[in-house]
């Protein structure tokens, strides 16, 4: 692999990375987009089901819904940036540039006659009104391929597939690009600006809705280079992933299904969500996820009852997925919480700028402040689009790329056994699932940090003399796992998806008071 230079290096090919590349290229910058993906479905955005929220004619209501869902922890200025730019970003990229055909209502022909589009806006949990543009329940797969194809046809964009970023190139407090790897070879790509858009952290947990390879690479690289990270304790679990089997194989059942009337029932057939929240099945995700897990623990199972709607007609993609997994939805679909989204990440401003000069972060690996302690449904694609465009515009203004001394990554020792990284990942996922999951407590968080520190020490010893994608992904995962467990242990307040179990003595006293 040869050393290269580019005006803007974007790492990651989800909607956030693609939007950043598009905006930078529109402004005349030469863009290199490096992605581990070989197919669109390797990016988290492809898996997005529900859709993309817009403010419509009620931006104030949208703002309030985001802040309420965040358990009051969202940054109002960041929320304002998202809401103010939502409609224009969707109109520009998704409608005018790509021509995405979002679902319309039966009145769409009549709407067309009046100059309106007649979109079938969906409503999801914690949204006060229908505002979600969608294509069936598989919106991501209808957005990402056209966006990638558009970039492939752009003169200013070079896409490097099956290419991983291993480490940032820094010099005197500035980021000058990254070390890229493909087919076992690695070399620096020097850039005037570097945009990290590496997605989520699902590979750290036993059950996740993320694709394979979601190892938190961007967050780890940025943190190791000295960039600020924030809100790492806020790991969101989606309440309705197919329960699957012990292998952890699962698929997501969009919140839109509950938005259309599906109900959650325990093993005794009882609907339980009204006992937990006034909005029942449409309560914020963290509330529903904990309720589902509690009912699984108490009764043995929770199912999603889709009998109130015409499931096959309204959600044909999900019906097909059920058939693929051998699930008879007429009997209710077994569901359980699964890791879904990291609300924290690399701290950035309203243009996606990180604390290190010439470094940007967008999408799930960033912490914009929009999500606070819990993300509102169908705002992830929107955040990636809005911040991607803003970061790309700003990155295009950066200085010319400068060739500096790059990190000397060694690969002098014999390669490790094929099962080395796999076995370490099993250990890491077990620790994160048991100790840093949907509910946490002080003792378990302490145990997790002890195990993760030892694991990171082992991995660091190997990366000193070996360089491979699998080993660096493992390093990223251990770094991010430690960041999450430390942030969780340092935050004494239960908020949103950071839920601390009450101390045993207090819990016993509460139980006694109730007798």
Image: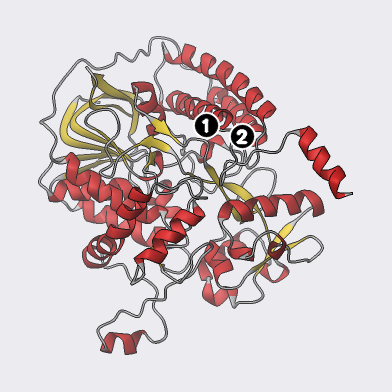
Residue 369: percent from left, percent from top? 39, 44
Neighbour class for label 1 at 10 Å: few (<14), some, many (≥20)? Answer: many
Neighbour class for label 2 at 10 Å: few (<14), some, many (≥20)? Answer: many
Frontmost residue, 427 versus 433: 433
In this rendering, the answer to whether 10 lies above or below 149 is above
Quadrant containing the N terminus is top left
Frontmost residue, 33 versus 95: 95
Point 69% across, 38% down: residue:
501
Q: Name the residue beneath numbered marker 2.
A: 436
Q: Mark 1 to mark 2: distance in Å?
A: 8 Å
Frontmost residue, 336 versus 184: 336
In this rendering, the answer to whether 57 lies above or below 491 is below
Q: Badges 1 and 2: C-beta atoms under 8 Å apart?
A: yes
Q: Name the residue beneath numbered marker 1.
A: 484
- The part of the image, by quadrant, that contains residue 354 is top left
Point 56% across, 73% down: residue:
260
Q: Dot 1 lies on which element?
A: helix
Q: In the shown orientation, is residue 253 left or right of residue 345?
A: right
């Amino acid at each position: 692999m040869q050393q290269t230079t580019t005006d803007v290096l974007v790492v990651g090919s989800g909607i956030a990375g693609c939007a950043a590349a598009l905006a930078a290229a529109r402004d005349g910058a030469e863009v290199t987009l490096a992605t581990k993906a070989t197919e669109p479905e390797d990016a988290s955005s492809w898996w997005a089901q529900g859709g993309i929220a817009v403010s419509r004619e009620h931006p104030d209501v949208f703002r309030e819904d985001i802040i309420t869902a965040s358990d009051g922890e969202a940054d109002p200025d960041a929320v304002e940036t998202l809401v103010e730019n939502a409609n224009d970003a969707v109109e520009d990229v998704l409608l005018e540039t790509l021509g995405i055909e979002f679902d319309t209502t039966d009145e769409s022909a009549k709407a067309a006659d009046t100059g309106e589009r007649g979109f079938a806006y969906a409503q999801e949990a914690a949204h006060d009104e229908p505002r979600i543009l969608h294509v069936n329940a598989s919106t991501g797969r209808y957005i990402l391929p056209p966006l990638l194809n558009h970039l492939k046809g752009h003169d200013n964009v070079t896409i490097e597939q099956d290419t991983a970023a291993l480490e940032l190139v820094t010099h005197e407090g500035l980021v000058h690009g990254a070390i890229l790897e493909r087919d076992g070879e690695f070399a620096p790509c020097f850039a005037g600006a570097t945009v990290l858009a590496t997605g989520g952290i699902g590979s750290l947990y036993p059950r996740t809705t993320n694709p394979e390879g979601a190892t938190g690479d961007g967050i780890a690289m940025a943190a190791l280079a000295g960039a600020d990270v924030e809100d790492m304790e806020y790991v969101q679990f989606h309440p309705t992933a197919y329960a699957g089997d012990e292998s952890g194989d699962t698929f997501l059942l969009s919140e839109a299904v509950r938005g259309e009337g599906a109900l959650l029932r325990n093993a005794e057939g009882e609907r339980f969500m009204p006992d937990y929240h006034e909005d029942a099945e449409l309560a914020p995700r963290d509330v529903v996820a904990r309720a589902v897990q509690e009912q699984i623990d108490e009764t043995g199972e929770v199912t999603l009852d889709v009998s109130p709607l015409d499931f096959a007609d309204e959600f044909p993609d999900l019906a097909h997925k059920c058939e693929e997994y051998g699930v008879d939805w007429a009997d209710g679909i077994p569901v359980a919480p699964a890791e879904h989204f990291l609300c924290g990440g690399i701290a950035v401003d309203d243009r996606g700028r990180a604390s290190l000069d010439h470094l940007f972060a967008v999408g799930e690996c960033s912490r914009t402040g929009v999500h606070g302690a819990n993300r509102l449904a169908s705002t992830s694609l929107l955040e990636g689009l809005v911040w991607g465009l803003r970061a790309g515009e700003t990155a295009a203004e950066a200085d010319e790329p400068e060739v500096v001394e790059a990190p000397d990554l060694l690969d002098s020792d014999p390669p490790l056994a094929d099962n080395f990284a796999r076995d370490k990942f099993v250990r890491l996922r077990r620790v994160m699932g048991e100790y840093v999951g949907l509910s946490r407590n002080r003792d378990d968080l302490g145990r997790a940090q002890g195990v993760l520190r030892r694991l990171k020490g082992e991995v660091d010893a190997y990366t000193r003399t070996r360089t491979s994608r699998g080993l660096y992904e493992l390093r990223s995962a251990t770094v991010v796992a430690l960041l999450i467990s430390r942030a969780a242990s340092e935050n004494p307040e239960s908020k949103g998806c950071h839920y601390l179990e009450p101390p045993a003595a207090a819990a016993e006293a509460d139980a006694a008071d109730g007798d």
